[in-house]
Image (cartoon, helix red, strand yellow):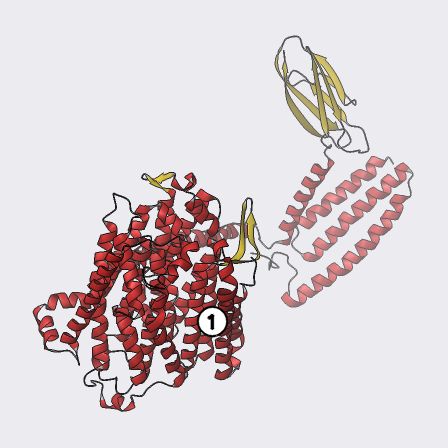
């Protein structure tokens, strides 16, 4: 069914355009009203489409909106088409809902910023691009959104560009994402070569049918589907901060906190998960690629959780936590449990956005500092923030009843029960599930460490800061409470399938991503009990170490294993390794190219070389310019004489007709242009230099005595001026 | 007198004039040599005109004389102007076009 879906991304995009062009001339009130209303209206339109128009059509592919043909070439036609099906509708709702809340929050958080209009313009632009990514019906349209959110991420990380560190964090994010985007492009073109279409539904249908175009072997014995899926996953790993391209996300915390909440926690970084789920059928066709997704997700979940143990910056801890949770989602989609992955994406959007906004609220109170070693005891000064943080903390730890508990369990259960890998790769599911349980323990530990260090015990801030501690204004606390409520309740959409109203999200998403796996309730209960125990163990351990500030066991642990702690605190020195392996050689190569190719080859030889050539030719030609009028005159006279000679020559005949009959040859010339006076024609047929026929007639004939190759030479003379011209032809006589 | 005699005189005059234009160094003499060339041309025109019985040659001779007068006027003005600025009329010393 056709609809007006394009309004959804268009509203924030128009608002962004307006704020970029005219925002400076308006007051803060006008700016944030325009920005918030654009996103709010997008939320209303998408909610209207999602709740009223979509349910009737969800089985038949959802709502579509073809705005027009974007480009067409030969058989290829790419439409600027949008589609809202079960999956993209849900994402659309998450993006606009969280986006609207964070716009409202930003009016408080950024209230004193100089560049108010620019911030909201970028935020709007981000929402528009993200909605385009989500709703795009073909890979190129999705790619526009994909690049658009990357651009906004770059712009917003470097929002406070006055500090070099922020600007270089932006560049790091952008460049790392480019590596992934290259993978996305390659995957997209591989798919196009195989399926000759960019339309996502067409690709999904081809994959579901198991078409031979996708299962044909491409390289190293693996099918097209595997390589396309693998390259697309490289793009997803860049955007969603997975090993090996996760390094940009912790640095991205240089941006304003609402940006971290919206872009680097709730929406943009989940685009990779969304993309894999959207193309789920393709991944199911290539279990090996699915295994890569699951393994990378599991490793990232564990690795990032471990790094988060030793970070002392509020937002850095949350950043590594985001990377780890994205790993959970990738295990979800990587074990064919697409609904589970999207469910965790959904709940994560609430509790992680909530956590980041709490971080913003705390940093607002702490005068911008995010150092958790200088915090403590904030629960008394920031009661609302503390309560929301408690809910989100318990949600991310996976304590029962809270939303994260259900979504995390859906993923872990799915990983243990999955059958998508077949016999050879059967170990991947359980291995990923086990490492997720370990990561869940880590998650509970580092999040509880964060909670205890920030909110409990004595305040370790300096007296001046301590005096100014205050709860944030209503426009910041309001969105916090809404997100806290979401973090508490969002789990109800994905209760285990055996329960009443169980697995609503799985049933809802089934038309888009396929039916979810039937899991035995025994396994479900075991996983639930295990993960509850793990969550409580993590929290208990953290309380033992950090309850009310760093305690004796924590100090003893650091004293006992100083090396290990230093390595974890140094983030396993991955940044340094990349610096050595990638950045330095790249810089060296660039420098070499600059010195050899640019400086020597281009500047010296090509640019300078041409200049030298032209100059030396000019120097030579200068010798002719002697400045003596009489010599000029002599040259002029010679030139005139040459001109007269050339002009006086007879014109070339326009046509030379040569007929050979046996040994007889007939030549006929037709005059090139009519000219007064008679011409003389001399014909030399045998090439001996003597003219055999001479006269004013332009034709002659001759008969040869012997066969062979002869040279025919015709001399045309103008008797008036005694000038002539010669035509030569070679003649074969048989 | 036969026509070729006039033509011979005309040729001789033209070559004298040309030699003067190319070889003399004084701008005034060069101008006079140009006049000589023009006179040679006029003579040839008149000779052919008489030989062919065609009056157009005579008409042309008047044109040539008019042009010669104009050329002399402009040329002399230039020479006077050059002499005023440089105190010389030697063409060897007027070589500002040298590259």
Q: Quadrant of residue A493?
A: bottom left
Camera sees residue A230: yes
Kindly state the secondary structure of the residue where label 1 is placed: helix
Q: Quadrant of residue A457?
A: bottom left
Q: Residue furthest top?
A: A705
Tag 1 residue: A124
Horizontal side of B49 relative to A547 (left or right) equals: right
Residue at image location 43% in from the left, 76% down from the top = A103
**Residue A290, image x, y percentages:** 32, 50
Which is more toward the observer, B49 or A160? A160
Camera sees residue A576: no
Residue A94 lies, with reference to residue B29, above or below; the image says: below
Query: Which quadrant would the N terminus of chain A be assigned to in this image?
Result: bottom right
Chain that bears disc 1 = A
Q: Quadrant of residue A660?
A: top right
Residue A337 lies, with reference to residue A130, above or below; the image says: above
**Residue A201, image x, y percentages:** 47, 51
| Tally of marks | 1
Residue at image location 70% in from the left, 29% down from the top = A724
Query: Which quadrant would the C terminus of chain A be assigned to in this image?
Result: top right
**Residue B84, image x, y percentages:** 67, 67
Which is more toward the observer, A641 or A475? A475
**Residue A687, image x, y percentages:** 64, 18
Which is more toward the observer, A564 or A578? A564
Q: Residues within 10 Å of mark 1 (few under 14, many from 20)?
A: many
Residue A561 lies, with reference to residue A205, above or below; the image says: below
């Amino acid at each position: 069914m056709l609809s007006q879906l394009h309004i959804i991304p268009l509203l924030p995009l128009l608002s962004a355009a307006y704020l970029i062009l005219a925002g400076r001339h308006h007051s803060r009130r006008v700016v944030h009203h325009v920005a918030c209303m654009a996103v709010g209206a997008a939320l209303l339109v998408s909610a209207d489409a999602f709740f009223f128009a979509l349910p009737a059509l969800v089985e038949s592919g959802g709502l579509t909106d073809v705005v027009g043909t974007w480009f067409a070439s030969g058989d290829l036609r790419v439409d600027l088409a949008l589609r809202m099906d079960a999956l993209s509708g849900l994402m659309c709702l998450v993006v606009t809902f969280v986006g609207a809340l964070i716009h409202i929050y930003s009016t408080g958080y950024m209230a004193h910023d100089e560049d108010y209009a620019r911030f909201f313009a970028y935020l709007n632009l981000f929402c528009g691009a993200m909605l385009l990514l989500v709703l795009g019906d073909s890979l190129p349209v999705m790619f526009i959104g994909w690049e658009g959110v990357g651009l906004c991420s770059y712009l917003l990380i470097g929002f406070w560009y006055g500090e070099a560190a922020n600007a270089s964090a932006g560049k790091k994010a952008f460049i790392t994402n480019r590596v992934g985007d290259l993978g996305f492009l390659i995957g997209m073109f591989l798919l196009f070569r195989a399926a000759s279409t960019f339309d996502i539904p067409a690709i999904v249908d081809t994959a579901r049918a198991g078409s031979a175009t996708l299962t044909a072997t491409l390289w190293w014995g693996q099918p097209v589907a595997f390589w396309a899926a693998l390259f697309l996953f490289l793009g997803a790993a860049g955007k969603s901060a997975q090993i090996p391209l996760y390094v940009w996300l912790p640095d991205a915390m240089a941006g304003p906190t609402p940006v971290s909440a919206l872009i680097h926690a709730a929406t943009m970084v989940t685009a990779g998960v969304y993309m894999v789920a959207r193309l789920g059928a393709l991944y199911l066709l290539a279990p090996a690629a699915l295994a890569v997704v699951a393994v990378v997700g599991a490793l990232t979940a564990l690795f990032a959780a471990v790094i988060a143990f030793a970070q002392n910056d509020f937002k850095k801890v949350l950043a590594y936590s985001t990377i780890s949770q994205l790993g959970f989602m990738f295990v979800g989609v990587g074990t064919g449990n697409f609904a589970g992955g999207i469910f965790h994406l959904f709940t994560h959007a609430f509790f992680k956005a909530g956590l980041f906004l709490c971080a913003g609220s705390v940093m607002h109170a702490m005068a911008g500092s995010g150092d958790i070693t200088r915090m403590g005891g904030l629960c008394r000064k920031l009661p609302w923030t503390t309560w929301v943080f408690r809910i989100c903390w318990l949600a991310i730890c996976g304590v029962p009843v809270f939303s994260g508990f259900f979504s995390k369990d859906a993923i872990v259960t799915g990983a243990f029960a999955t059958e998508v890998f077949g016999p050879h790769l059967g170990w991947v599911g359980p291995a990923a599930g086990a490492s997720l349980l370990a990561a869940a323990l880590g998650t509970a530990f580092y999040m509880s460490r964060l909670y205890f260090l920030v909110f409990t015990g004595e305040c370790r801030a300096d007296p001046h800061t301590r005096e100014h501690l205050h709860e944030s204004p209503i426009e910041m606390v309001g969105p916090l409470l809404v997100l806290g409520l979401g973090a508490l309740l969002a789990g109800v959409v994905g209760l285990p399938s055996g329960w009443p109203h169980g697995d609503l999200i799985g049933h809802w998403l089934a038309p888009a991503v396929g039916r979810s796996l039937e899991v035995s309730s025994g396994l479900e209960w075991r996983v639930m009990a295990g993960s509850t125990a793990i969550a409580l163990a993590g929290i208990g351990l953290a309380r033992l170490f950090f309850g009310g500030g760093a305690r004796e066991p924590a100090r003893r642990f650091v004293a006992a294993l100083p090396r290990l702690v230093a390595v974890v605190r140094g983030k396993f020195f991955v940044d340094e390794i990349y610096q050595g392996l990638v950045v330095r050689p790249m810089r060296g190569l660039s420098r070499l190219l600059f010195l050899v190719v640019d400086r020597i080859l281009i500047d010296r030889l090509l640019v300078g070389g041409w200049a030298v050539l032209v100059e030396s030719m000019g120097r030579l030609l200068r010798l002719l310019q002697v400045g003596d009028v009489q010599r000029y005159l002599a040259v002029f006279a010679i030139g005139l004489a040459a001109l007269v000679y050339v002009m006086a020559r007879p014109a070339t005949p326009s046509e030379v007709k040569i007929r050979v009959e046996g040994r007889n040859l007939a030549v006929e010339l037709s005059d090139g242009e009519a000219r007064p006076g008679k011409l003389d024609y001399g014909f030399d047929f045998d090439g001996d230099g003597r003219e055999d026929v001479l006269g004013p007639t332009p034709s002659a004939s001759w008969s040869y005595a012997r066969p062979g190759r002869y040279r025919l030479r015709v001399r045309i003379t103008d008797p008036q001026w005694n000038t002539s011209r010669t035509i030569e032809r070679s003649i074969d006589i048989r | 007198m036969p026509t070729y005699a006039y033509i011979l005189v005309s040729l001789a005059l033209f070559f004298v004039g040309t030699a003067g234009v190319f070889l003399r160094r004084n701008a005034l003499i060069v101008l006079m040599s140009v006049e000589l060339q023009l006179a040679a041309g006029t003579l040839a025109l008149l000779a052919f005109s008489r030989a062919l019985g065609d009056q157009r040659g005579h008409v042309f001779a008047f044109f040539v004389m008019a042009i010669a007068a104009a050329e002399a006027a402009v040329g002399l003005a230039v020479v006077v102007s050059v002499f005023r600025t440089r105190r010389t009329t030697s063409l060897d010393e007027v070589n500002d076009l040298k590259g």
